[in-house]
Amino acid sequence: MAETSPLTVFEERQDQIHCTGDGPFEMACNRDSLAGAVSQRACVFCGSRVVLYPIADALHLVHGPIGCAAYTWDIRGSLSSGPELHRLSFSTDLRERDVIFGGEKKLAAALDELIDRHHPNAAFVYSTCIVGIIGDDLEAVCRTMTEKKGIPVIPVLSEGFKGNKRAGYLAACKAMNRLVGTGDVTDISPVSVNILGDFNLAGEIWIIRNYFERMGVQVVANITGDGRVADIRRAHGAALNVVQCSGATLDLAKMMREEHGVPFVRAAYLGIEDMADSLYRIADFFKGIDPGIVDRTRALVREEVSALLPRLAEMRRDLEGKKAAIYVGGAFKAFSLIKAFRHLGMTVAVVGSQTGTEEDYAELAQVTDPGTIIIDDANPLELSRFVKEKDVDVFVGGVKERPIAYKLGVGFCDHNHERKIALEGFEGMYNFAREVHASAMSPVWRFVPRREAQNRAAAKGGTAPADAGSDAPAPGEANIPNDKEAVA
Amino acid sequence: MKTKESFVSTTNACKLCKPLGATLAFKGVEGCVPFLHGSQGCATYMRRYIISHFREPMDIASSSLGEKNAIYGGGPNLKKGLLNVMQKYGAKVVGVASTCLTETIGDDMPMIIAEFRREFGDLDLPEIVQVSTPSYEGTHTEGFHAAVRAMADQLVTDKVEPHGGVNVMPGLASAEDQRHLAELVRLFGAEPTLLPDTSDTLDGPALMEYERIPSGGTPLSAIRAMSGARGTVELGRTLKGMRTGGDGLAQRFDVPLFKIGTPVGLRETDGLCAALEAITGAPMPKALLKERGRLVDALVDGHKYVFGKRVVVYGEPDLAIGLTAFLAEMGAQPVLVATGAEKCGLAGHVAEACGDLLRERPEICEGVDFHEIAEKAEAMGPELLVGNSKGYPSARKWNIPLIRTGFPIHDRFGGQRILHMGYKGALGLYDAVVNAVLEKKQSDSPVGYGYL
Ligand code: SF4
Ligand code: SF4
């Protein structure tokens, strides 16, 4: 395989990169990050934090040394319509003394102090790598504090090294599951849902809730965007769980199905088709007890889409034929994005994710055009190489990918947890198109070295190669200059 | 002075963790890849944090320890990681910093690295610098200085022929600061060697090819030649009590060492110029005299706007000391100087740097977080905040201007190009302070004056 794979930068990663159309599909994923590579991947704690933090009236205390908490202080645009406790960064800031003698006392004292100060409706205590090593009994401390303070104090077993982000999702779901089933469900409508897996970035969950309300569906709990402890406690009273995203909260939906008999459907809110499909799926579920819901949903979709399409058409005129690269956290987002780009007349040349499963990648291979690069847990070298090789116009990724795109003179859209623009729902599709348009159509790309070279070559009469200035990579080799040139 | 005993918990820390500082220092060496020995998450978080400030690529490799490694030791992963970084990135230098995890499980990094050198001695190995940076003691500032010291100790091994160069240890300085420092040394007729120098690696140009390791940084050869320099200037008053990279060069190679304050404002910059005069023997350059003159002229022109303004300064201790001294020079009244770092002698250094300029002593706080800073400051009725972008929630709450300085700046553009140092830097800061005061006055006024 080594000599036939022109795609690798690190040999060990050969089976984490696939090119659509290149033989049978076979990819390894969800393996630990390769030592020494600069992975874009995060840790278990990061996964848990991403899921739970938007619960705005809970105290989120990171039990560990300062960094883990400091780097996650208010980094996401998860909005709250009320309390904003989640925007503060709480840490036990463990010191050498605590590492030697154990951090349990300090943890209890910190909880005491913070719960008295902020009166949260619940507290989540996140364990970090060190805590896993020094062996603090989080469970015991939390139990004592629950009794003492009269609110649920819940440990989140998120020691960073015990897996990747996905393990963190599971830990978060387990933590939330302790709340579910403890609240009063008497006034809940039979036509009701919980929204799972939306984090209300830039107010997105409000867009989705608005659609549901127009359909006549009651939303019981937001899990977790603009989330509240009391809502989660009574979430088992909802008739249906609507789960977005392939990983983050699926575990909770499964737990709730098993323990409370609440069924779930999958949903995706990015792009026109996925958004509409999701609404129809929910209407379908409830049409037995609420026959009018199908018509109401149809009317809603018609209204929204007919308003949206003409506005998209304007931008599509400019974007037709341009190429995109996608690198996102969960693979589910990649599917939606691929479709969204089709609406803009664009093709997807590179697509990857941090936490996709083998099935995800197999499906990606099916829905993408031949020649599309599919990649799991990419590092900057690989990303930059494929972006350049495929000569993409716009890169969609997170904040860590932005400088890679910009250095090479490629447009960029932030599609990660830190985005401040709502991209979900029909209006989100418009915002997305505008973002892509603003980046792809900017005149600045003309001045970046890569394009200048292409334009120079074109002006000379020849047709410029896609990646002017570099030779095609030799088989089995990375398309990067050799060591001497690179460090000269 | 108060240290933090008042609260057990930390809310909105006014510090970052130690390895982050080390990675920033390593980033300033040519061909160097910063490498964290620990689990993957720390490296990814730090990258994200740093990238949000610089908007530049910042690769940090990691030994990506998993659960098994945490139990049986991370040695094999560290070695494998080193091999990868060297083979795939073509690293000439690898700067390895430990993390809380590997310190806690007791990995003996020097031993593992020595083993690595033995096992793979037949290969063209990069220089490996290693530094111990457990975050449960010390902050990113200390991690930065520890990495600088490690580089000086481990890379500068032999006395070279004396040359006319000047070593500069800039501390946590912006890219613009570093460029300016180099320029200042050249104005005194000498060649500077900055350790580290991130002015290109973290503020580089648009490129044709993605560089595995961004060009720039101090070349290894220049670092080795630091033993033959005419002198070393080390910036940061808090370094006075520590054993630093400059101390090592002085003790081992007799390179005269000048430990001076971070040159922010008039007198601290005078201190830098005096040191450069002493090292090079060259008189103060005319161009600099003019810059100094312009600064003094500006201070006169603007003095009424800023006199007595109550200012809260926070952040990295050495920058905070410099900024406080400068605020004192312009006639403002620093009321609170705060940092998340501990045992850095902040009170003494602020008092020394401000001399007899201040009519009232500011309250000094070490080891505090933003919760305590806000709590204390609120009672003081501050009119201006000076520090990194993390003070913004307070500025917003109190509806007062925040002059953004230092690291990180996550809510504005161009943080790496803020010039704090030298007369020129002071002048820019002064403009920013005066204009912030004017803008506030203008927008609060019902009249809407067009001349201010
Ligand atoms: S574990 Fe230590 S090194 Fe890692 S992010 Fe937390 S404080 Fe920093
Ligand atoms: S210490 Fe562990 S939990 Fe904290 S950021 Fe690092 S990997 Fe994640």
Image: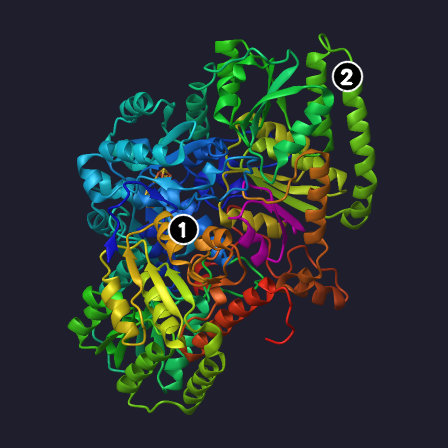
- Which residue: 39% across, 83% down? B186
Q: CA distance from mark 1 to mark 2?
A: 52 Å
Q: What mark, if any, has residue B416 been given in the picture?
A: none
Question: Is residue B84 at least partly visible in the picture?
Answer: no
SS at mark 2? Answer: helix
Q: Which residues are magenta?
A: A390-417
Q: What mark, if any, has residue B60 been given in the picture?
A: 1
Instruction: From the viewer's side, name the closer residue of B450 and A2.
Output: B450
- Where's residue A98, x and y in %? 21, 39
Q: Quadrant of residue A237?
A: top right
Q: Is residue A266 left or right of residue B202?
A: right
- Where's residue A114, x and y in %? 35, 36
**Residue type indicated by callout 2:** Val
Q: Is residue B442 left or right of residue B304?
A: right
Q: To which residue does mark 2 refer?
A: A294
Quarter of the C terminus of chain B within the rendering: bottom right
Which subunit holds the residue at mark 2?
A
Q: Is residue B208 left or right of residue B79?
A: right
Rate crowding at label 1 as few (under 14), some (14 to 19) or many (20 or more) other CA atoms within 10 Å: many
Instruction: From the viewer's side, name the closer residue of A453 and B255.
Output: B255
Residue A274 is inside the magenta segment: no
Relative height, residue A470 to residue A237 (above, below): below
Q: As drawn, which residue projects farthest toward the left? A: B251
**Residue type indicated by callout 1:** Ile
Relative height, residue A240 to residue B399 (above, below): above
